[in-house]
Amino acid sequence: MWMGIDLGTQSVRAVVAADDGAILGSGSAPLTGRRDGRRHEQLPADWWTAVREAVRGALRDGHRPRALAICATSGTVLLTDDRGRELTPAVMYDDGRAPGRGTGRARLLLDAYGPGRITHQADLIAARLAGRPLPTDSSHALKTGYDPERGEFADPGLPGLPEVVRPGTVVGEVSRAAGEETGLPAGTAIVAGMTDGCAAQIASGSLTVGSWNSVLGTTLVLKGVTATPLRDPSGVVYSHLSPDGDWLPGGASNVGGGALRTAFPDADPAALDALAADREPADRAAADRAAVAPVAYPLGARGERFPFLAPDATAFVLGTPASDAEHWAALLQGVALTERLCLDYLDLLGAPVDGPLTFTGGAVRSAYWTALRAEILGRPVRVPEYSEPALGMAVLAAYGAGAAPTLAAAAERMVRLSRTVHPARTGRFTGPYLTLVGELERRGWLPSATAAHARARTERDR
């Protein structure tokens, strides 16, 4: 059996999974932080307290995992001393004082507190478990300026940079002291992990070249697999290095369920889903319907980052919804239309996008929205039985400990599918899709080359 630990923004989750993927035990504990304007920090000591509680919960039935791996929020850093003890608060991934990828957050800490070892969120917990600092992994280090192609940091002169290894590498083992605090057997192997987004991709089972996972929750994230790094001149798509040697390109859009909660804070989603089914584009010509049906671009916050970069982008609805049900329907459809544009953009970059597609995230709890997205994308989609990032880390732990020859093989054995959803009809949303593409281009947010490719691909698929 194998353990995965997921350090989130609001909680820590731990699971113990059997070699066939069955969840044998799970535990969780809450986390809080401090937000003040652009500042967002957490206390690293709180992480360890929550990890101890979550791990003990997962082990309550006496399970003894052979190995574990840890995922955490991408871009969260702190400074530690040479024994792995925290020297500073943690600057969270969405702290606005040093935005963007690279070394900004690390420099912020170094300037404010002086020298120290640059440590990612997952690194601190690994060090606490081992009783000493361990190497970081290339996935968590990516947003600290690590280039996995060249195998070095973009700014090697930055003080305090850690040693980096490939995810899936055994880097240490649980110490006796940490075992007494957590209930983990001393000697349990610690496997270098990956970021939470990559962990969710592993838990989806989408690990063969050409496969993709679409995670829809507050926002929309697409991650896939390519044999070589995917080049994106705009920088909205970037690639992690898979333990298998393939590449995991992906991008995150600001559309998603957050926009629904903003528009309908007290809604009953299931009740509105039932009403929205009657507000889909009619079976008559889609172009005629698009002229009268609302078309929404449901951003959850100002600015867009995928499938295009537009810091000033704002949400909009073309047309006036006749009711809450029609407004809800437009938002659900708008997220799926943007999801389709994301895949069209990935196709423009040369990524293989016609392989298996998996849906994960909170949105899969809505059977209606899942079926609607499949229809708008015009392809079948798979829904795993359990797709939490912690499971992805249990899969990675199994691979790292040698229980499978490849990460894909470990996932094939441990990730269970709940169902496959086939689109009932296709083509009914062509009009709304082209309307959205045209409006995004007209506003100057969507590059003309991307818009032209989306139109050409739509014409090809008719």
Image (spheres, helix red, strand yellow):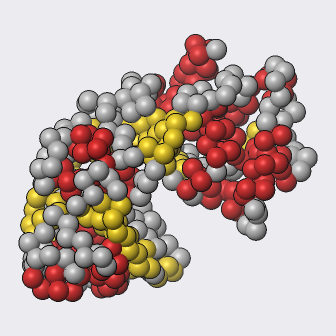
Residue 155 location (% of width, % of height): 19, 55
- Disc tally is 0
Residue 127 location (% of width, % of height): 16, 74
Q: Residue at x 29, y 50 (%)?
A: 20
Q: Is residue 440 visible?
A: no
Residue extending farthest to the front is 61
Q: Residue at x 73, y 66 (%)?
A: 265
Q: Nearer the viewer, residue 18 or 407?
A: 18
Q: Quadrant of residue 369?
A: top right
Q: Residue at x 78, y 23 (%)?
A: 286
Q: Is residue 88 visible?
A: yes
Q: Nearer the viewer, residue 76 or 397?
A: 397
Q: Nearer the viewer, residue 45 or 86?
A: 45
Q: Quadrant of residue 149?
A: top left
Q: Quadrant of residue 407?
A: top left
In the picture, which quadrant includes the N terminus? Answer: bottom left
Left or right side of 293 for 130: left
Q: Residue at x 36, y 50 (%)?
A: 203
In the depicted structure, whether residue 270 falls above or below residue 423:
below
In the picture, which quadrant includes the C terminus? Answer: top right
Residue 171 location (% of width, % of height): 10, 62
Left or right side of 117 for 122: right
Q: Nearer the viewer, residue 38 or 455?
A: 455
Residue extending farthest to the right is 322
Residue 429 location (% of width, % of height): 71, 28
In the depicted structure, whether residue 153 falls above or below residue 92:
above
In the depicted structure, whether residue 336 falls above or below residue 120:
above
